[in-house]
Image (tube, rainbow, N blue to C red):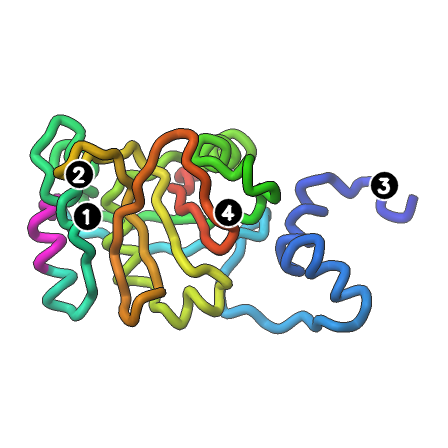
Amino acid sequence: MKYSSLDLGTVEAVFNKLGGLEGARAFLRGEQKLAPSQFERNEHGHIVFTFDSFDFLTGEQEVERLIAAGFRVSDWAKSCLTSKMSDGYDKNHRLIAGQYQIALMPTREIERDSDRTTDALRKRGIEKYGYEEPLAGIMPRIRESVSDKQMEEMGFSYIAGPHDPIKDSGGDPRVLGADRDGGGRWLYANWDRPGCRWDDGGAFAFFVPAS
Protein backbone atom coordinates (compact mmCIF):
# COMPACT_ATOMS: atom_id res chain seq x y z
CA MET A 1 0.00 0.00 0.00
CA LYS A 2 1.43 3.36 -1.02
CA TYR A 3 0.19 5.18 2.10
CA SER A 4 0.37 2.43 4.70
CA SER A 5 0.58 4.88 7.61
CA LEU A 6 -2.57 6.77 6.59
CA ASP A 7 -5.07 6.89 9.46
CA LEU A 8 -8.85 7.23 9.33
CA GLY A 9 -8.80 10.71 10.90
CA THR A 10 -6.62 12.06 8.09
CA VAL A 11 -8.85 10.45 5.46
CA GLU A 12 -11.93 12.03 7.05
CA ALA A 13 -10.24 15.44 7.18
CA VAL A 14 -9.52 15.20 3.43
CA PHE A 15 -13.13 14.25 2.71
CA ASN A 16 -14.37 17.17 4.85
CA LYS A 17 -12.10 19.51 2.91
CA LEU A 18 -13.62 18.27 -0.36
CA GLY A 19 -17.18 18.65 0.89
CA GLY A 20 -17.90 15.11 2.02
CA LEU A 21 -18.37 11.97 -0.08
CA GLU A 22 -20.26 13.71 -2.89
CA GLY A 23 -17.68 16.50 -3.01
CA ALA A 24 -14.87 13.96 -3.24
CA ARG A 25 -16.62 12.14 -6.09
CA ALA A 26 -17.16 15.45 -7.91
CA PHE A 27 -13.47 16.28 -7.44
CA LEU A 28 -12.42 12.93 -8.91
CA ARG A 29 -14.74 13.50 -11.90
CA GLY A 30 -13.07 16.87 -12.47
CA GLU A 31 -16.28 18.76 -11.71
CA GLN A 32 -14.99 20.46 -8.56
CA LYS A 33 -11.74 22.31 -7.99
CA LEU A 34 -10.03 23.09 -4.72
CA ALA A 35 -10.14 26.80 -3.95
CA PRO A 36 -8.08 28.60 -1.30
CA SER A 37 -10.08 28.93 1.92
CA GLN A 38 -10.04 32.06 4.02
CA PHE A 39 -11.09 30.03 7.04
CA GLU A 40 -8.62 28.24 9.27
CA ARG A 41 -9.30 24.54 9.68
CA ASN A 42 -8.04 22.01 12.17
CA GLU A 43 -6.89 18.44 11.62
CA HIS A 44 -10.53 17.30 11.39
CA GLY A 45 -11.33 19.73 8.58
CA HIS A 46 -13.48 21.85 10.89
CA ILE A 47 -13.45 25.63 10.73
CA VAL A 48 -11.89 27.10 13.87
CA PHE A 49 -11.62 30.69 15.05
CA THR A 50 -10.92 32.67 18.19
CA PHE A 51 -12.86 35.56 19.66
CA ASP A 52 -12.41 37.84 22.65
CA SER A 53 -15.11 37.83 25.29
CA PHE A 54 -16.26 40.54 27.64
CA ASP A 55 -16.50 40.02 31.36
CA PHE A 56 -19.81 38.72 32.71
CA LEU A 57 -22.28 40.54 30.45
CA THR A 58 -25.79 39.75 31.66
CA GLY A 59 -28.41 38.42 29.29
CA GLU A 60 -30.21 41.76 29.27
CA GLN A 61 -26.96 43.51 28.41
CA GLU A 62 -26.37 41.05 25.58
CA VAL A 63 -29.80 41.82 24.11
CA GLU A 64 -29.21 45.57 24.39
CA ARG A 65 -25.74 45.30 22.85
CA LEU A 66 -26.86 43.23 19.86
CA ILE A 67 -29.91 45.35 19.06
CA ALA A 68 -27.89 48.58 19.35
CA ALA A 69 -25.41 47.14 16.83
CA GLY A 70 -28.19 46.35 14.34
CA PHE A 71 -28.57 42.62 14.96
CA ARG A 72 -31.96 40.94 15.18
CA VAL A 73 -32.81 39.00 18.32
CA SER A 74 -35.85 36.72 18.23
CA ASP A 75 -38.41 36.86 21.01
CA TRP A 76 -37.49 33.33 22.13
CA ALA A 77 -33.80 34.25 22.25
CA LYS A 78 -34.66 37.31 24.36
CA SER A 79 -36.69 35.07 26.65
CA CYS A 80 -33.74 32.71 27.14
CA LEU A 81 -31.17 35.47 27.62
CA THR A 82 -33.28 37.23 30.26
CA SER A 83 -34.46 34.07 32.02
CA LYS A 84 -34.13 34.22 35.82
CA MET A 85 -34.82 30.51 36.31
CA SER A 86 -32.32 28.12 37.87
CA ASP A 87 -31.14 27.03 34.41
CA GLY A 88 -31.13 30.61 33.15
CA TYR A 89 -28.48 32.45 31.19
CA ASP A 90 -27.15 34.73 33.94
CA LYS A 91 -26.59 31.92 36.43
CA ASN A 92 -25.03 29.38 34.10
CA HIS A 93 -23.88 30.71 30.74
CA ARG A 94 -21.99 34.00 31.03
CA LEU A 95 -18.40 34.07 29.78
CA ILE A 96 -15.52 35.66 31.64
CA ALA A 97 -13.15 38.02 29.86
CA GLY A 98 -10.59 36.24 27.71
CA GLN A 99 -10.04 34.40 24.44
CA TYR A 100 -12.10 31.42 23.39
CA GLN A 101 -11.38 29.06 20.50
CA ILE A 102 -14.39 27.59 18.76
CA ALA A 103 -14.71 24.69 16.31
CA LEU A 104 -17.66 24.38 13.93
CA MET A 105 -18.69 20.78 13.29
CA PRO A 106 -21.06 20.44 10.29
CA THR A 107 -24.34 18.73 11.12
CA ARG A 108 -24.10 16.88 7.78
CA GLU A 109 -21.38 14.67 9.30
CA ILE A 110 -24.30 12.52 10.40
CA GLU A 111 -25.86 11.59 7.08
CA ARG A 112 -29.21 10.03 7.99
CA ASP A 113 -31.90 12.55 8.94
CA SER A 114 -33.32 10.17 11.53
CA ASP A 115 -29.94 9.89 13.28
CA ARG A 116 -29.09 13.61 13.29
CA THR A 117 -30.31 14.30 16.82
CA THR A 118 -29.01 16.76 19.38
CA ASP A 119 -27.63 13.92 21.49
CA ALA A 120 -25.86 12.26 18.56
CA LEU A 121 -24.29 15.48 17.29
CA ARG A 122 -23.18 16.56 20.76
CA LYS A 123 -21.72 13.10 21.43
CA ARG A 124 -19.85 13.14 18.12
CA GLY A 125 -18.25 16.50 18.86
CA ILE A 126 -17.22 15.61 22.40
CA GLU A 127 -16.29 11.92 22.12
CA LYS A 128 -14.98 11.71 18.57
CA TYR A 129 -13.12 15.03 18.38
CA GLY A 130 -12.43 15.86 22.02
CA TYR A 131 -14.30 19.17 21.97
CA GLU A 132 -16.02 20.59 25.04
CA GLU A 133 -19.68 21.45 25.47
CA PRO A 134 -20.05 25.23 25.16
CA LEU A 135 -21.88 27.82 27.22
CA ALA A 136 -24.73 29.77 25.65
CA GLY A 137 -22.54 32.86 26.04
CA ILE A 138 -20.59 31.92 22.91
CA MET A 139 -23.56 32.54 20.63
CA PRO A 140 -23.81 36.36 20.94
CA ARG A 141 -20.06 36.52 20.27
CA ILE A 142 -20.35 34.17 17.28
CA ARG A 143 -23.23 36.26 15.95
CA GLU A 144 -21.04 39.37 16.20
CA SER A 145 -17.93 37.66 14.83
CA VAL A 146 -19.35 35.74 11.84
CA SER A 147 -21.25 37.64 9.15
CA ASP A 148 -24.06 36.16 7.08
CA LYS A 149 -21.77 36.32 4.05
CA GLN A 150 -19.12 34.29 5.89
CA MET A 151 -21.72 31.76 7.00
CA GLU A 152 -22.77 31.37 3.37
CA GLU A 153 -19.15 30.88 2.31
CA MET A 154 -18.74 28.29 5.06
CA GLY A 155 -21.79 26.48 3.71
CA PHE A 156 -23.93 26.95 6.83
CA SER A 157 -27.43 28.39 7.08
CA TYR A 158 -27.17 28.33 10.87
CA ILE A 159 -24.68 27.82 13.70
CA ALA A 160 -26.14 26.41 16.93
CA GLY A 161 -24.59 26.03 20.36
CA PRO A 162 -25.14 22.55 21.87
CA HIS A 163 -25.12 23.98 25.38
CA ASP A 164 -27.31 22.89 28.28
CA PRO A 165 -30.81 24.02 27.26
CA ILE A 166 -32.37 27.14 28.77
CA LYS A 167 -36.12 27.16 29.40
CA ASP A 168 -37.96 29.99 27.68
CA SER A 169 -40.91 31.88 29.18
CA GLY A 170 -43.21 29.03 28.15
CA GLY A 171 -41.08 26.42 29.90
CA ASP A 172 -39.72 24.88 26.70
CA PRO A 173 -35.98 24.03 26.49
CA ARG A 174 -34.03 25.95 23.85
CA VAL A 175 -30.49 26.50 22.59
CA LEU A 176 -29.18 29.71 21.06
CA GLY A 177 -28.04 29.93 17.46
CA ALA A 178 -27.03 32.32 14.69
CA ASP A 179 -29.21 32.27 11.59
CA ARG A 180 -28.64 33.94 8.21
CA ASP A 181 -32.18 33.46 6.91
CA GLY A 182 -34.97 36.00 7.25
CA GLY A 183 -33.40 39.23 6.05
CA GLY A 184 -30.91 39.99 8.79
CA ARG A 185 -28.23 38.72 11.14
CA TRP A 186 -30.38 36.86 13.62
CA LEU A 187 -29.70 35.45 17.06
CA TYR A 188 -32.44 32.92 17.61
CA ALA A 189 -33.38 30.14 20.02
CA ASN A 190 -34.25 26.69 18.71
CA TRP A 191 -36.59 24.36 20.57
CA ASP A 192 -34.42 21.54 21.86
CA ARG A 193 -34.65 18.13 23.45
CA PRO A 194 -32.12 15.28 23.26
CA GLY A 195 -34.06 13.58 20.45
CA CYS A 196 -34.62 16.73 18.38
CA ARG A 197 -33.41 16.38 14.79
CA TRP A 198 -31.45 18.99 12.88
CA ASP A 199 -31.19 19.51 9.14
CA ASP A 200 -27.87 19.02 7.38
CA GLY A 201 -27.26 22.67 6.51
CA GLY A 202 -25.79 23.91 9.77
CA ALA A 203 -23.00 23.49 12.29
CA PHE A 204 -22.65 22.87 16.02
CA ALA A 205 -20.21 25.19 17.80
CA PHE A 206 -17.97 23.64 20.47
CA PHE A 207 -15.23 24.88 22.77
CA VAL A 208 -11.76 23.73 21.72
CA PRO A 209 -9.83 22.67 24.87
CA ALA A 210 -6.74 24.68 25.66
CA SER A 211 -3.63 22.71 24.75
Callout 4 environment at 10 Å: few (<14), some (14 to 19), or many (20+)? many
Label 2 vs label 4: CA separation?
24 Å
**Which numbered disc covers residue 107?**
4
Magenta stretch: give its range. 56-64
Quadrant of res 17? bottom right
Q: At label 3, which amino acid type do we have? A: Ser
| Residue 5 pos. (x, y %) | 80, 40
Label 3 vs label 2: CA separation?
53 Å
Question: Does 191 appear above or below 20?
Answer: above
The residue beneath circle 1 is 76
In the image, is 211 to the left or to the right of 97?
A: right
Label 1 vs label 3: CA separation?
52 Å
Find out whether the residues at labels 4 and 1 contact each other: C-beta distance under 8 Å. no
Find out whether the residues at labels 1 and 2 contact each other: C-beta distance under 8 Å. yes
Callout 1 environment at 10 Å: few (<14), some (14 to 19), or many (20+)? many
Q: At label 1, which amino acid type do we have? A: Trp
The residue beneath circle 3 is 4
**Which numbered disc covers residue 168?**
2
